[in-house]
Image (cartoon, rainbow, N blue to C red):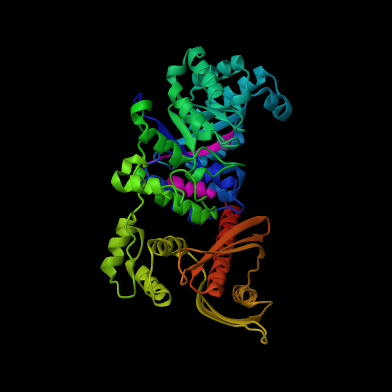
Amino acid sequence: MKKDRVYIFDTTLRDGEQALASSLSVVEKIQIAKQLERMKVDIIEAGFPVSSPGDFNSVQTIAKEIKNCTIAGLARAVEKDIKAAADAVRLAKRPRIHTFLGTSKLHREKKLRKDQDAIVEMAVSAVKYARRFCDDVEFSCEDTGRTEPEFLFRIVEAVIKAGAGTVNLPDTVGYTVPTEFKRIISSVFANVPNIDKAIISVHCHNDLGMAVANSITAVECGARQIECTVNGIGERAGNCSLEEVVMAMKVRQSLLKVDTNIDTKEIMRSSRLVSRLCNMPVQPNKAVVGANAFAHSSGIHQDGVLKEKTTYEIMRPGDIGLSENQLNLTSRSGRHVIKHRLEKLGYGEKDYKLEDIYTKFLELADKKGSVYDDDLEALVVLKEGASQDTYSIDYLNVTSGTKVIPTATIIIKSAKGLVQEAATGDGPVDAACKAIERATGISVNLTDYRISSNTGGKEAVGCVNIIAQYGDYRLHGVGLSTDIVEASALAYLNVINKVVRLCEVRKAKKKK
Ligand SMILES: [Zn+2]
């Protein structure tokens, strides 16, 4: 281990995912995991395997498919959880079991109802048990920020002795301020005799907007792993944001004297992918990845930037992979132009089928005129997700108006062939959704419907995001089209396809 290297532990798929209004499908999780791998994060926390069969399955699939990152599975400090995590990450090239236990007085007394000795014993046996399956074990002292210092030193020393290679000290409730967090982390370094045998990690929440500041403070005290998420998504106000903490260490390297392995040029793409798949928009003034992060509005600033960029710009847009020139693509653009553009956006030939994307691109260009980078990227991202879909729309016709009953006719394509159905509804979107339900035999309960434009202009592509309930599951669907009824139908079918996969996973699990 290099002393000045800070390891980036990404928990977008665990802490981030658990806070979403609807869970991600396995296919979506793999898309995100592959992008995290491309961005060169060190550790991907892929999920909490014991929590559900779906979570187990996605952790296992990610463990199989991702080769260049450590894959961690979360487990409470109990054997059942640890066994599930061990099984799920077993096939990873570099597996890790991450087990945690509440250590603050509040957690010990109110939640776990155990005294200090019992907590230490539970932590030590959890770490030892996890080490039976895996050499790489991380232990988290949940609610470190509110744990009594003497007890914290004792438990950290004990779990390191038991074989934890990484010890995480989370500010679980986002309560501490940097000066206070500095005292906590440096006191651990000063008072735990075997501290040099483990990497100290931090996991800061953003309830008071101090997650990044606290994480950087911890690094200054000697912490060498930061747990964070793309766009800072996560429980409540979210986690330490990956792009902010990484860019802070890059831009202020001469001061902080640490480095990460992150390929920062992949930051923007990761941010867009996570925002799109998680249905979590990024605020325009968000540090690093917000739409205005590199926009200069005041005349004095604009004048300064034009004369010398560094007057008001502390990092370059290119550093995070933001392309400066927006090339307009039209139906006259050939395949090689599309390929070249996608390459600029970071997509290699293996990421998509050129023929498929080109056909979709031409359809879009015919309807819309100009196709922007964002549109093109959306095609690739959604196409990649749709490649394993059971159903697709072959034909859709909707009539509506002031004096007609809204009616939709649809032809749905699947491996079994074509199915034609028609339905009426309260409006054109309702009619289209009902026709889809009839054709597929699956119905869900729509709980949220949102429409936005993907890119600017009158001919913008409509992006429909829906949340639907299916039994106990909340699912997110997205559809893109210049026609909003079609975009709605695509979003609805996206959810139906997720239901099909969900049922397959549950069936497979039952057979086991
Ligand atoms: Zn957390």
Residue 470 magenta-highlighted: no
Q: Can you name the residue that lies furthest to the bottom here?
A: 403
Residue 300: % across, % down? 39, 46
- Taking the spot 43% from the left edge, 76% from the top edge, the residue there is 367
What quarter of the picture does the N terminus occupy?
Answer: top left
- Find ligand 1 in the image and state its quadrant: top right
Q: Position of residue 26 (x, y in %)?
A: 51, 54
Q: Residue at x 34, y 56 (%)?
A: 345
- Give the mark count: 0
Residue 165 at least partly seen: no
What span is colored magenta in the figure?
57-76
Location of residue 88 with respect to 404 vertically, above or below: above
Q: Nearer the viewer, residue 469 or 62?
A: 469
| Residue 328, image x, y percentages | 34, 67
Q: Is residue 138 left or right of residue 432?
A: left
Q: Is residue 65 magenta?
A: yes
Instruction: In this rendered view, identify the residue nearer to me: 94 or 175.
Output: 175
Which residue corresponds to the image point at 72% horizontal and 24% vertical from the top-left? 109
Q: Position of residue 57 (x, y in %)?
A: 53, 49
Q: Nearer the viewer, residue 148 or 244?
A: 244
Q: Is residue 260 above or below residue 435?
A: above
Q: Residue furthest front?
A: 300
Which quadrant holds residue 351? bottom left
Q: Is residue 297 visible?
A: yes
Q: Is residue 307 left or right of residue 497?
A: left
Q: Quadrant of residue 16?
A: top right
The correct choice, above or below, for 176 with respect to 229 in the image is above
